Every structure is written in C-alpha cells, then in structure tokens.
Image (tube, grey):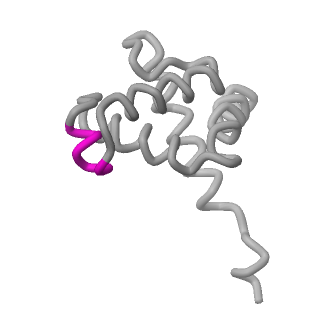
Amino acid sequence: MADARGAEVDVLRSVVADRDDLMATLRCYLGNARNRRQTAADLHIHANTVDYRLRQVGRLTGLDPVRDDQLPRIVAALVAFDAQRSTTVHPADVA
C-alpha cells in the first residue's frame, strides 16, 4: 500500500512542480463538487480556462478529473500528497 501511496503522490508532484495554478484549479473544482462554473467564479477565470486546466491535469497525470471512475484515485492522491507535505521538514522551518 505504501508503494501505491507513493505513486499517487508522484502523480500530483508532476502537476505542482511548476504549475500551482493547476493544483489550485483541481482543489477548487473538487471542493465545488466538480462544478466548473462555480470553480471559474471562485478563481475569477473563464469556465473555458477551468476546462483547459483540468485537461492539463489529465495530460500531466494520466488522471482525468472529469471522469467519475478516476475521482477516487485523484482524491486519494490529494490526501496522500497533503499528508506527505505536512510531515516534510522544510529547511527554512528548521532555522
């Protein structure tokens, strides 16, 4: 199970490496029960931009946030990613 969690975290790491906007869009989209119009309003962007960003998440991770069958894996990846980030000690926090 630890290997699966690591794989899920790696999937999301590929998104957030250089694209905080994609992670923010994904989190907002999921937080809005996958309502793209509400996500667009919350992020102050056009709904087409939400669609584009979600396609980019799918392209980069292989997980399509619009597909129901992939939702559990995406949520698991977010939970594992957050758990790993909360236990990681950053050098700036040590000083």
Q: Out of 26 and 55, give the one closest to the viewer.
A: 55
Q: Out of 13 and 84, give the one closest to the viewer.
A: 13
Dominant SS in magenta? helix
Where is residue 53 shown, x and y percent of the image? 48, 32
Q: Is residue 29 above or below residue 59?
A: below
Quarter of the image where one finds residue 28: top left
- State the count of labels: 0
Where is residue 39 shown, x and y percent of the image? 28, 40
Q: In the picture provided, is 95 more to the left or to the right than 15?
A: right
Residue at x-position 70% and y-position 62%: 88
Quarter of the image where one finds residue 95: bottom right
Q: Is residue 25 above or below residue 88?
A: above
Residue at x-position 69% and y-position 26%: 4
Q: In the picture provided, is 85 more to the left or to the right than 68?
A: right
Residue at x-position 44% and y-position 37%: 26
Q: In the picture provided, is 12 more to the left or to the right than 92?
A: left
Quick one: which residue is furthest to the bottom in this view?
95
Q: Is residue 41 magenta?
A: yes
Where is residue 55 shown, x and y percent of the image? 50, 22
Q: Quadrant of the N terminus?
A: top right
Q: Is residue 76 magenta?
A: no
Q: In the picture provided, is 34 more to the left or to the right than 19?
A: left
Q: Which residues are magenta?
A: 38-44
Residue at x-position 58% and y-position 41%: 80
Where is residue 2 shown, x and y percent of the image? 71, 33
Q: Out of 41 and 28, give the one closest to the viewer.
A: 41
